Image: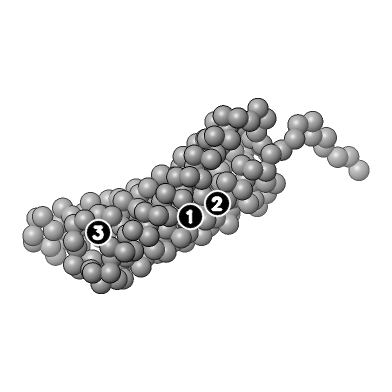
Amino acid sequence: MRFKLRLTPRDTTFFDLLGASASHLVSGSNVLAQVLGAKQGDRKDLAKRMTEIEHLADEATHSVVKKLNTTFITPFDRDDIYALASALDDCMDFMDEAADLIVLYKLKEIPSRVADQVEVLQRMAELTAEAMPKLRKMADLGDYWVEINRLENQADKHYRKLLSMLFDEISDPIQLMKLKEVVDVLEEAADGFERVANTVETIAVKES
């Protein structure tokens, strides 16, 4: 039996930090769902909790960058590590922005179809968190990026239907603009999760 000899050590800290960053996405997506279902008066506290999670995610990203700047040998390409950390951080930023806009714009009623968008984000976050530990062995990741791409297509359909509904049913132009901005940011979050999956695919192909 032949064993592949690895001449350089693998620092597992990066995997731990990326896993922590992805776990914050799960927490954030769940709080975002709570924001949608809460009464207007209860949303401010939930948005504050969302911001706290976003700060934790930022800390995880900064830790990755700091580790990159102080580590000579990395488990895989350092540019890919940075790209993955940044993509994870972008997902959190978009979800935090959506929660913040809902509170700042004092939206009383949010169309039920918006919940469909957030449900997709929740599933994307769960899959992303499950995928990060698999980077250690670069195994069993194909199903992850395929499913994320499928969910992103589903998110696109929800987005288009929601836009059509907004323009058909909301006559107040100011209210329309506010809701559309929230919906647009949620769509950007879905695109962000797809960028994470695409980055993971790139890393896996390089390491195979």
Answer whether residue 64 is visible to the viewer in this image.
Answer: yes
Q: Identify which amino acid the numbered label 1 is placed on.
A: His
Query: Dot 2: within a 10 Å radius of its alpha carbon, few (fewer than 14), some, or many (20 or more) residues?
Result: some
Percent x, y of residue 42: 28, 69
The C terminus lies in quadrant: top right
Percent x, y of residue 117: 35, 60
Kindly identify the residue that appears in the image at 39 percent across and 63 percent down.
31
Tag 1's secondary structure?
helix
**Looking at the image, is 87 positioned above or below residue 78?**
below
Kindly identify the residue that appears in the image at 14 percent across and 65 percent down.
169
As measured in the structure, the alpha-carbon distance from the residue carrying label 2 to the one carrying label 1 is 6 Å
Kindly identify the residue that appears in the image at 25 percent across and 54 percent down.
101
Q: Which mark is residue 20?
A: 2
Query: Dot 1: within a 10 Å radius of its alpha carbon, few (fewer than 14), some, or many (20 or more) residues?
Result: many
- Residue indicated by mark 1: 24
Tag 3's secondary structure?
helix
Q: Nearer the viewer, residue 47 or 164?
A: 47
Q: Identify which amino acid the numbered label 2 is placed on.
A: Ala
Percent x, y of residue 162: 25, 60
The disc, 2 or 3, on the residue closer to the chain's N-terminal end is 2
Percent x, y of residue 165: 20, 62
Pointers 2 and 1 in contact (CB under 8 A)?
Answer: yes
- Residue indicated by mark 3: 102
Q: Identify which amino acid the numbered label 3 is placed on.
A: Ile
Residue occupying the far top of the picture: 72
Residue 200 falls in image quadrant? top right
The disc, 1 or 3, on the residue closer to the chain's N-terminal end is 1
